[in-house]
Image: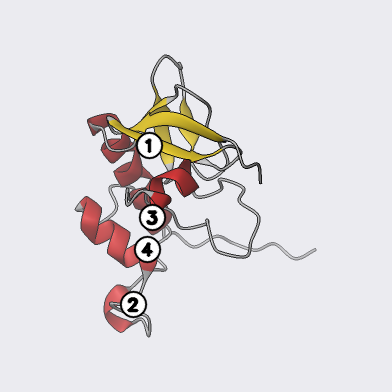
Amino acid sequence: MSALTVKLKIDNVEVEVPEGITILEAARNNGIEIPTLCALEGLTAYGGCRLCLVEVKGAPKLFPACTTPVSAGMEVITNSALLREYRKMTIQLLLSERTHVCSVCVANDHCELQSLANKLGVDHSIFERNWSRKEILCR
C-alpha cells in the first residue's frame, strides 16, 4: 500500500484515506457502514453479493464498494433510497429460494443475512417459489 493519501467524500463527509484502498475499506475506516455478505477478512473481494453497491456522483451506474478503489475527489453515496430498495430486492432474491427458515436455524439471531434482512425491513420474499413436482425421466 502506498504512503500517499487521497481525499474523497463519503455521504458528504470528507475523508482522507490511503491511496489504493477500496471504498468499503475507506468507509469502514471512518465508521461508515456499508452492508456486505461476501466481503470476508482473509478472502479476495469479488463483489458477488451485490449488497455493497454504492453510487458515485457523476457515474451512470452503481459500483461494488468492496472492489472499487478510491480516487481523489470521488463523491460516494452509500445510503440513498435507490440503494435501500436495491438492497431489499437483493435480500428478497436471496430469501426466495425458501431454504432460509430462521426460526429453526442453529444460526438464528447470529446470522448476517437475517440481520441485514431485519435492518432493511425484509420479513418475506416477494418472489413466488414453484413447488410443483418435476418428473425425472430415466432412459
Q: Which residue is mark 3?
A: 96
Q: Looking at the image, can residue 36 be seen?
A: yes
Q: Quadrant of the C terminus?
A: bottom right
**Point 38% across, 55% down: residue:** 96
**Residue 102 position within the rendered picture, expressed as x and y whole percent measured from the top left:** 30, 74
126 left or right of 45 in image = left
Q: Which residue is mark 1?
A: 15
67 left or right of 133 in image = right
- As measured in the structure, the alpha-carbon distance from the residue carrying label 4 to the one carrying label 2 is 9 Å
- As measured in the structure, the alpha-carbon distance from the residue carrying label 4 to the one carrying label 1 is 29 Å
Q: How many marks?
A: 4
Q: Does residue 16 lie above or below 102 as drawn?
A: above
* Colour approach in the figure: secondary structure
Q: Which mark is residue 113?
A: 4
| Disc with the residue nearer the chain's start (2 vs 1) | 1
Residue 126 vs residue 113, the one in the foreground: 113
Q: Which residue is mark 2?
A: 110
Q: Looking at the image, can residue 128 be seen?
A: no
- Tag 4–tag 2 contact (CB < 8 Å): no
**Residue 32 position within the rendered picture, expressed as x and y whole percent measured from the top left:** 32, 48
State the SS at label 2: loop
Q: Nearer the viewer, mark 2 or mark 1?
A: 1
